[in-house]
Amino acid sequence: MSLTDFLPTPKFEEYKERFKNHYKLDRREDGVLLVQAHTNGGPIQLSVENHRSVGQLFKTIGADPDNEIMIFTGSGKDFMMDSDREGFKLEEENLDYWAYEYAYKDGRINVSSLVNDLEIPTIGALNGPGFHTELCLMCDISICTEDTVIFDLHYDIGSVPGDGIHSCFQELLGVKRAAYALLTGQAIDAKTALEYGMVNEIVPREKLIERAYQIADHIMTQPRTTRRLTTQIVRRPWRQRITNDLDGGFGIQMFGHLAKKRAMHGRKHISSTVDYVREGRKNNFD
């Protein structure tokens, strides 16, 4: 007998409760896990708190051997179109500390954990327009609603787009399309996203979760080892991309913040910046 015991693995009911203020978690008996990100029950509002929670969640899910597939989606009609009014006080109060502790460290872990810590198939289900859609687009399979709009707001709020969305866009769009999207804030509608290869399917809103479960049911037809080892194959391009780009991109973005010595993520700033998406325009300058 070994001199020591295994450390206990996470228990679903415990972390379901722990993460409830950021995610609604439901798991079927077969291990298919539905994660619905939210802020107070509605669409996600970006904050340092939910930013940190992403990597913590993915690491916890990945450490629970009873999870077999993860479906990740948002709540309400938007994926992420706003920020928490009080959610970036830490950035305003201590920009130097925020830039490392809450941005560079947390952000790198978030994207890396999605690719490296989840050895289970993942399905991203975009439930509407929003930024930081890399959380769904970097899943193994991505589906979206008909009214989904994908865009990056960083450049328009005076920030360098280097915190993971750049890696996602460059991998999926290629060099020229990614450069255009990142520099102009291009609003990419669902039809264009499908054409560009950013998503696999467009699904009516009322059928989004149902379709995600249908895809999960098909994936579950093969043995556990086959499912998990297949993720090692399909994720190799993402692993190579984030190894090559992620740390450097984040470092450049944080240098840009510190060089300007001012916060960027206030609710008023973000809300006004995304108005063109709400208005159905392609960018902020035409």
Image (cartoon, grey):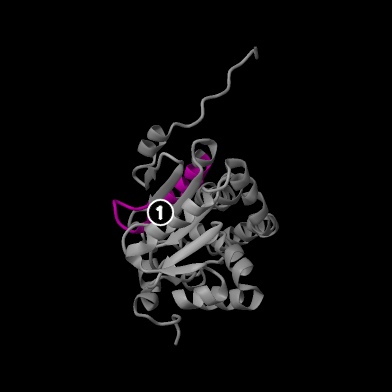
Residue shown at the point (34%, 66%) measured from the top left? 205
Point 44% across, 80% down: residue: 284
The image position of residue 3, as x and y in percent, is 64, 12
Examine the rendered structure and indicate whether residue 201 appears above or below residue 13.
below
Could you tell whether 119 is left or right of 124 in the image?
right
- Residue 26 left/right relative to 61: left
The answer to whether residue 20 is above or below residue 202 is: above
Q: Residue 25 appears in which quarter of the rendering?
A: top left
Q: Which residue is mark 1?
A: 47
Q: Nearer the viewer, residue 93 or 168?
A: 168
Asked whether 186 falls inside the magenta stretch, the response is no
Q: Amino acid at mark 1?
A: Ser
Q: What residue appears at the point 51 percent right and 46 percent down from the top-left corner?
A: 55
Q: Position of residue 240 (x, y in %)?
A: 70, 57
Residue extending farthest to the bottom is 286
* Magenta span of residues: 37-59
170 sits to left or right of 94: right
Residue 58 vertical placement versus 1 (above, below): below
Compared with 85, 281 (above or below) is below
Q: Nearer the viewer, residue 257 or 110?
A: 110
- Residue 19 appears in the figure: yes
Of helix, strand and loop, which one carries label 1?
A: loop
Residue 186 in view, yes or no: no
Query: At which x and y percent is residue 16?
Result: 38, 38
The residue positioned farthest toward the left in the image shown = 41
Q: Quarter holding the N terminus?
A: top right
Q: Quadrant of the C terminus?
A: bottom left
Residue 268 in percent (x, y) is at 34, 66
